[in-house]
Image: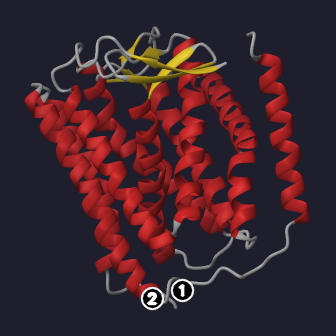
Amino acid sequence: MFFVELGQEFGATSDFQYLFIITITIVWLSLVIYSLKKEGIRKTTRYFLPMMIAALFIEASAVANGRFRYPGYLIYFNVLGGSVPFIILIGWSSNLYLFLQMSKSVVTKLYQKINIIQLLLISTFSGIFGICLDLLEDPLAHHNNWWIWTESTGGLTFFSVPFSNFMDWFIILFFMSLATIFIEKSGYSENRKLILAFTSLTLVFAAIYLSHTVLTEAFQFIGVI
Amino acid sequence: MDNLPILILLGSLGIIITIYLWITGKKTHKEEQTDNGFDYITIFKISFTVISLIYLFRLIMMFFTGVLSGFYLLSVVGAIIAFLPLIAMSFVRYNKKIKLKV
């Protein structure tokens, strides 16, 4: 069900893949060190590890369904019949932490009551900020073969990247941010929060797949996808 | 889908444990706007600086990769859009009218 693979064609598909790998590694390390200093080991684990697990299953199922593929990386994790590079997993965990902190920084100044509206606003901003960066990153990745979109795109595209990609970025960041801050604000002990962060992934997966299905149907109906 | 039974089992376990932990959990503390001995304003300032710099680094690296790979139009359009979150952060950080209640 789960195993590690070593890629045989590391860096062979693109001249600029090493720049992407270096950037993600530096960003991830900086954020982990910053989080360890500010939040401690248990909070840092809660912020980064569940997102890596979520990304593994979501990306692997997309690869297995033939939406896109990842050529030319060194270490792959294989689940559900799809292989996902390790760097993509740490990329997603840094995405969640980065955009969650950015949206917190904006929303806590605009709306200061700690309630469900604030949590929803933080999650929404996190998703929107994620899309803002991905509008630069995903077309660049497709152009340089960091990952290759293979699904047929009949609808709206942005520099050859299908609209559904940006929709999925929003859905993933929205629900992962919501789950993370919902657990954070629960007031339970740190150990309980840590276990909840992992067990609640099932519910987060369900919400992500349900939203993906409903929104895909809706956008297909109006001809965007 | 050979893994389907295992996934259903893991999924069901995840839901049951989550509900159990959530229902039986006791609140040990109330969320407050202080942490690690710093006041909230100090944390806000440090967080703003570190997070902005890391995001800016990522944005610049992506922009130069785009330019190096000859994707000029995307690099400019994408960089402008990707800069919007930083503008939003700076707006709330430096806007004197937006006060943070402590």
Indicate the colouring scheme.
secondary structure
Residue B59 image position (x, y, % from top left):
23, 47
Find the distance from the CA under tag 2 to the CA under tag 1: 7 Å
Circle 2/circle 1 CB separation < 8 Å = yes
- Which residue carries the number 2 mark? B38
> B91 left or right of B71?
right
Query: Image quadrant of residue B75?
Result: top left
Residue A56 image position (x, y, % from top left):
55, 31
Q: How many marks?
A: 2
Q: In this orientation, which residue lies closer to the viewer: A166 or A204?
A: A204
Residue A25 image position (x, y, % from top left):
31, 43
Residue B23 seen in render: yes
Residue A125 image position (x, y, % from top left):
48, 56
Residue at image x 18%, y 43%? B61
Q: Chain of mark 2?
A: B
Query: Image quadrant of residue A133?
Result: top left
| Location of residue A120 with respect to A185 vertically, above or below | above
Tell me the SS state at disc 2. loop
Query: Image quadrant of residue A192?
Result: bottom right
**Residue B34 numbered tag:** 1
> A113 left or right of A125?
right
Residue at image x 85%, y 28%? B9
> A24 left or right of A12?
right
Q: In this orientation, which residue lies closer to the viewer: B15 or A74?
A: A74
Residue at image x 48%, y 50%? A96
| Location of residue A124 with respect to A4 vertically, above or below | below
**Circle 1: is it few (<14), some (14-19), or many (20+) Cα within 10 Å?**
few
Q: Chain of mark 1?
A: B
Q: Amino acid at mark 1?
A: Thr
Residue A106 seen in render: no
Tell me the SS state at disc 1. loop
Q: Amino acid at mark 2?
A: Phe
